[in-house]
């Protein structure tokens, strides 16, 4: 999977956003076509994002080009829209689905939905809240009722999945969000813990481990009493996994997830930058191996307008950052699980990617030692 950030332009100002919002000139569609071509034939999944990708003028031309290479699978598209018999079949199809757009949903007009339908594109819609109070506080500039209306237009015509970022500001809407998407007949919601980078870092947006774990337990309890048809995915950061293991609760929680066919715990492995399926190209054509790093020039691995893709993927100085162990992590019992955590968050917090992850449960004691 590679993410292509088509534009930095965005009509919202979300409090946690990891991207830059600017009005600088976007790359021409011909540039994007050349960049996309460099990913053929090895690329299996294309995610169009941004900024707000539906604001990029040339998006239709790019979709047409991608589809000339990877024709639309009508049957899969219909199944993704209407749902599968089993959650694991849906999970597999989502993984294999080739063309995705991540959108804030404000521009999901009838015309844009027809375009996505025509080219067989799945929409991952970002919905960090299911009440106007929570949603509009996080997604600054958006109207919850407008998004709800746009969702109503899209459901049943294209596959719509939900991305929900968990932060202190959205905690209260997490369980209601599962009920909300189930009610609308949406078959998939993914919860991701906020990463403390870019605007999230500047705004002090975070999620405390205790509260995140309490939420996992609440979601499991809810599934036991009123199981949903919707597939519910929870991303778990490496330091959150360590937190659970240290408390002796990890085995129990993962076993409980195993008992629910429609609940999945997705564990992040952040150090695999060489894995070609995790990169991102930013709106100026720069490549980096971590999809969260596209607006952090420190992690730039080369501009694909000038650098061959293989050279960018093998850019050793950035790979080194992800391969080295932070000094303070050297003797940690959980090193094999966590490997020092997220280099981006360390860089953002300390100006040094080789300091341990600021969300490490042992941060204070290690920094003092
Ligand atoms: C950067 S946005 C770009 C696409 C589009 N504008 C949108 O909002 O969906 C892609 C996804 O990243 C998520 N995101 C933004 N900042 C984040 C952060 N600090 N931590 C985790 N996810 C974040 C957004 O909520 C959204 O689901
Ligand atoms: S998360 Fe998406 S919608 Fe929100 S400001 Fe960032 S790019 Fe825009
Ligand atoms: S000390 Fe380092 S390796 Fe150990 S849990 Fe903390 S960040 Fe992870």
Image (spheres, grey):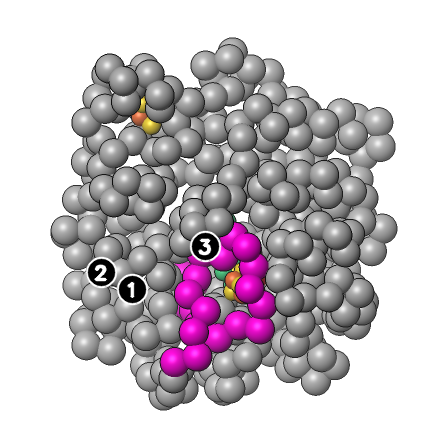
State which tag comes first along the sequence, 2 or 3: 3
Q: Residue 117 at x, y = what percent?
A: 67, 76
Q: Is residue 269 magenta?
A: no
Left or right of residue 158: residue 98 = left
Please say whether residue 7 is one of the residues in the magenta stretch: yes
State yes or no: discs 1 and 3 in contact (Cβ < 8 Å): no
Q: Quadrant of the N terminus?
A: bottom left
Which residue bears the numbered disc 1? 287
**How far apart are the alpha carbons under marks 1 and 3?**
21 Å
Q: Is residue 15 above or below residue 352?
A: below
Reply above or below: 295 against 8.
above
Q: Would residue 350 appear left or right of 221 to someone viewing this image?
A: left
Q: Which mark is residue 301?
A: 2
Q: Residue at x 72, y 39 (%)?
A: 172
Q: Secondary structure at mark 1?
A: strand
Sequence-wise, the earlier of marks 1 and 3 is: 3
């Amino acid at each position: 999977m590679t993410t292509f950030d088509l534009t930095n332009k965005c009509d919202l100002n979300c409090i946690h956003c990891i991207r830059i919002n600017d009005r600088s000139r976007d790359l021409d569609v011909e540039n994007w076509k050349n960049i996309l071509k460099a990913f053929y034939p090895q690329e299996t999944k294309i995610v169009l994002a941004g900024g707000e990708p539906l604001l990029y003028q040339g998006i239709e031309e790019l979709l047409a080009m991608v589809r000339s290479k990877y024709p639309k699978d009508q049957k899969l598209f219909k199944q993704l829209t209407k749902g599968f018999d089993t959650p694991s079949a849906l999970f597999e199809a989502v993984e294999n689905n080739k063309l995705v757009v991540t959108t804030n949903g404000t521009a999901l007009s009838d015309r844009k939905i027809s375009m996505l339908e025509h080219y067989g594109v799945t929409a991952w819609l970002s919905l960090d809240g299911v009440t106007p109070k929570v949603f509009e506080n996080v997604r600054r500039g958006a109207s919850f009722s407008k998004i709800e209306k746009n969702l109503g237009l899209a459901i049943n015509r294209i596959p719509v999945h939900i991305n929900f970022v968990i932060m202190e500001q959205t905690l209260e809407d997490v369980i209601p969000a599962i009920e909300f998407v189930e009610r609308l007949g949406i078959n998939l919601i993914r919860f991701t813990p906020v990463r403390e980078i870019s605007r999230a870092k500047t705004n002090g947006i975070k999620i405390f481990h205790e509260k995140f774990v309490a939420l996992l337990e609440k979601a499991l309890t809810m599934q036991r009493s009123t199981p949903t048809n919707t597939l519910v995915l929870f991303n778990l950061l490496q330091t959150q996994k360590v937190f659970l293991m240290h408390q002796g609760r990890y085995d129990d929680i993962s076993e409980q997830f195993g008992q629910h066919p429609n609940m999945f715990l997705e564990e992040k492995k952040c150090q695999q930058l060489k894995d070609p399926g995790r990169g991102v190209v930013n709106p100026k054509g720069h490549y980096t191996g971590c999809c969260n790093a596209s607006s952090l020039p420190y992690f730039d691995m080369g501009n694909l307008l000038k650098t061959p893709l293989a050279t960018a993927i093998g850019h050793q100085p950035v790979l080194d950052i992800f391969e080295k162990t932070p000094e303070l992590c050297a003797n940690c019992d959980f090193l094999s699980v966590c490997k020092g955590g997220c280099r981006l968050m360390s860089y953002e917090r300390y100006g040094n990617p080789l300091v341990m992850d600021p969300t490490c449960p042992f941060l204070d004691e290690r920094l003092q030692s």
